[in-house]
Amino acid sequence: MGRKKILIIDDEAKIVEMVKAYLEAEGYAVCTAENGVEALARNREYAPDLIILDLMLPDIAGEQVCALIRAESSVPIIMLTAKSWEESFINGLKIGADDYVTKPFSPKMLVAKVGALLRRIGGVPAKNEEAIEYDGIALNNIAHTVKKDGLPIDLTPNEYSILRVMMRAPGKLFTRKELIFNVFGGNYASDERMIDGYIKQLRQKLEDDPKRPALIMTVHGLGYKFGGEKG
């Protein structure tokens, strides 16, 4: 199996050089782009396994680049941003980002996030977990697909991973920390509010009425569970 390919999209040369060096030291093959137009071309030519995307590009807004890439591919996307945490994270989820890092950042932490996200995408499920179904929602662990009432639902890799964890145990209460641990790993440091963002996006995509969820329920003050009163 060849090396995993990473595309870095950022117009700050020093940041690109630093991140590229750290990624290559970990064995990744790295390609770069310094603007949105070049990024879209490189994505099609290079077919990366993961993209690191800066929101502040000189020609096209990073959010627009993300949306255009997501319309063509489910490649994992980590956003780089200097904007406020909540605004950027929620907006990023809406357009298909999988994770995000605020500038200034630790390159070691970014590389750790790259590795964690790629491991989640590449994980092989056990035989008895090839397919999970509940109340019209069908999750296929081999094809990494989700359908609702037979119709495909487009989820980002992190949304898919959170749904899979919860569907394995319908009715079980998951705290935010438990979801972070089960989805991102025990050594992954992250704000628990990111789980709220993912849950909000899953409800938008899966619930008949996201404001009155019947699948992903909030247990106030504690966390979330999948399956509502049926679990």
Image (cartoon, grey):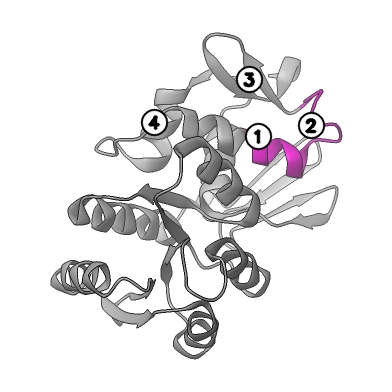
Secondary structure category for the residue under label 1: helix
Give the residue type that dot 2 points to: Pro
Mark nearer the viewer, 4 or 2: 4
Point out the frontmost of discs 3 and 4.
Answer: 4
Could one spot residue 150 in this view of the protein?
yes
Direction front: furthest residue: 58
- Return the residue at label 2: 210
**Residue segment shown in magenta:** 200-214
Q: Quadrant of residue 85?
A: top left
N-terminal of the pair, mark 4 or mark 2, is 4
Element under disc 2? loop
Residue 75: image x %, image y %? 52, 68
Which quadrant of the rendered structure holds the N terminus?
bottom left
Residue in front for this viewpoint, 123 or 191? 191
Disc 3 designates what residue? Answer: 171
Mark 3–mark 1 distance (CA, rounded to whole Å): 18 Å
The reply to whether callout 3 and callout 4 are in contact (CB within 8 Å) is no
With 196 as the anchor, is 125 left or right in this view? Answer: left
State how far apart marks 1 and 2 are (Cα).
8 Å
Instruction: Report which residue position mark 4 lands on.
Output: 191
Q: Examine the structure image and report whether residue 209 is included in the region drawn in magenta.
A: yes
Residue 165 at x, y = what percent?
52, 37
Residue 188's spot in the image, x, y percent? Answer: 29, 39
